[in-house]
Image (tube, rainbow, N blue to C red):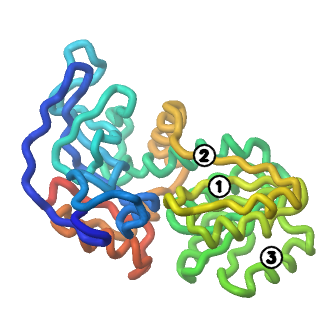
């Protein structure tokens, strides 16, 4: 990143691993919504950034490891490399590594576990939603994954919203009972659907100031609001909007090891269609275009996968 919304490909020295580290050759990278905050320049950093950012959802192969580690050279792994994933070689530790050997997953599908795992972790934070009314704000890749998973948790009603019409259609296909356009009529429509009771659980899956402010207005008294979308650094909460309804607020971010393992199991068994959200596959040489597509939500984009082997 040399400036907001501007990426350049440069040559850098190969990394040298320290004791306890491994070297990984990156093969696939997907663009997370939190990466887009950084792409837009909403992160308080000076430019240019250190090479590799903004990207953390990656797949790669081990090229150098410790003899005592349970990974062999050439093994395919999910990885969140230190210093970011927009590079051909990165270093990592055992903490951020998950083997995909034996899963039978194609690389483009396997890397989608990086999205599925945090969504699974978020659903654990929700606990029991059986029979409850649930409203999800945002139907980008994260919101659609949550729609898919929460549908399987037995809610009494599942409603979603987004500004992009194509995403509303996908939301219905993934289990939403209603998918309503965002905008000035959203609250009125939500009241009509809920019979003026509003919703037991509201999930915010965007991370923008406007949608975070919207979340408590959609919740019923003593309901729950889950903040899933990662906000940028300037985002604030308005406590009185939560106090007045005695709302329970919870957040979620980095998944646990069990979430990644569950995500890989689900993908290998075909329990959830994550590949259907991959709308664009681009070579690493088109990294600038990839981020612009994801940022603009243009051309029907949902998830962009960068092929790091195709430069």
Q: Position of residue 191 (x, y in %)?
A: 86, 77
Asked if residue 238 lies left or right of residue 57, the reply is: right
Q: Earlier in the sequence, mark 3 or mark 2?
A: 3
Q: Which residue is mark 1?
A: 227
Q: Is residue 5 above or below residue 242?
A: below
Asked if residue 62 lies left or right of residue 120, the reply is: left
Question: Residue 132: in sight, yes or no?
Answer: no
Report helix, strand or loop for mark 1: strand
Q: Position of residue 190 (x, y in %)?
A: 80, 76
Residue at image position (50%, 60%) is 232
Question: Residue 296: in sight, yes or no?
Answer: yes
Q: Earlier in the sequence, mark 3 or mark 1?
A: 3
Q: Which residue is mark 2?
A: 252
Residue at image position (23%, 35%) is 91
Report helix, strand or loop for mark 2: loop
Q: Quadrant of residue 68?
A: top left
How many discs appear?
3
Badge 1, how many Cα within 10 Å: few under 14, some, many 20+? many
Q: Give the quadrant of the C terminus.
A: bottom left
Q: Position of residue 138 (x, y in %)?
A: 60, 68
Verify CB contact (< 8 Å) between mark 3 and mark 1. Answer: no
Q: Find residue 189 and name its label.
A: none
Q: Find residue 190 and name its label.
A: 3
Q: CA distance from mark 3 to mark 2?
A: 25 Å
Q: Position of residue 42 (x, y in %)?
A: 42, 65
Q: Quadrant of residue 40?
A: bottom left
Badge 3, how many Cα within 10 Å: few under 14, some, many 20+? many
**Front in this rendered view, residue 138 or 208:** 208
Q: Is residue 52 above or below residue 121?
A: below
Verify CB contact (< 8 Å) between mark 2 and mark 1. Answer: yes
């Amino acid at each position: 990143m040399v400036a907001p919304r501007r990426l350049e490909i440069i040559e850098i020295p190969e990394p040298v691993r320290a004791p306890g580290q491994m070297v990984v050759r990156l093969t696939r990278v997907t663009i997370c919504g939190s990466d887009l905050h950084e792409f837009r320049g909403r992160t308080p950093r000076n430019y240019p950034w250190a090479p590799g950012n903004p990207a953390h959802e990656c797949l790669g192969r081990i090229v150098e490891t410790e003899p005592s580690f349970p990974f062999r050279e050439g093994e395919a792994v999910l990885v969140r490399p230190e210093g970011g994933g927009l590079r051909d070689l990165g270093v990592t530790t055992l903490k951020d590594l998950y083997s995909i050997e034996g899963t039978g997953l194609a690389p483009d599908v396997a890397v989608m576990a990086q999205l599925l795992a945090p969504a699974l972790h978020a659903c654990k934070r929700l606990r029991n939603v059986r029979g409850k009314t649930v409203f999800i704000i945002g139907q980008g890749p994260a919101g659609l994954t949550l729609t898919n998973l929460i549908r399987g948790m037995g809610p009494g009603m599942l409603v979603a919203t987004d500004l992009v019409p194509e995403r509303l259609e996908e939301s219905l296909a993934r289990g939403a009972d209603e998918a309503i356009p965002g905008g000035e009529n959203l609250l009125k429509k939500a009241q009509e659907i809920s019979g003026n009771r509003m919703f037991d659980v509201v999930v915010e899956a965007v991370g923008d100031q406007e949608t975070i402010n919207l979340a408590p207005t959609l919740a019923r008294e003593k309901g729950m609001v889950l903040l899933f979308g990662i906000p940028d650094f300037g985002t604030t909460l308005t406590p009185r909007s939560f106090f007045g309804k005695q709302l329970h607020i919870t957040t979620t971010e980095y998944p646990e090891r069990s979430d990644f393992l569950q995500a890989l199991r689900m993908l290998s068994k075909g329990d959830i269609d994550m590949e259907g959200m991959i709308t664009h596959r681009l070579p690493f040489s088109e990294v600038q275009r990839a981020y612009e597509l994801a940022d603009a939500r243009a051309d029907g984009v949902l998830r962009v996968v960068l092929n790091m082997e195709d430069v």
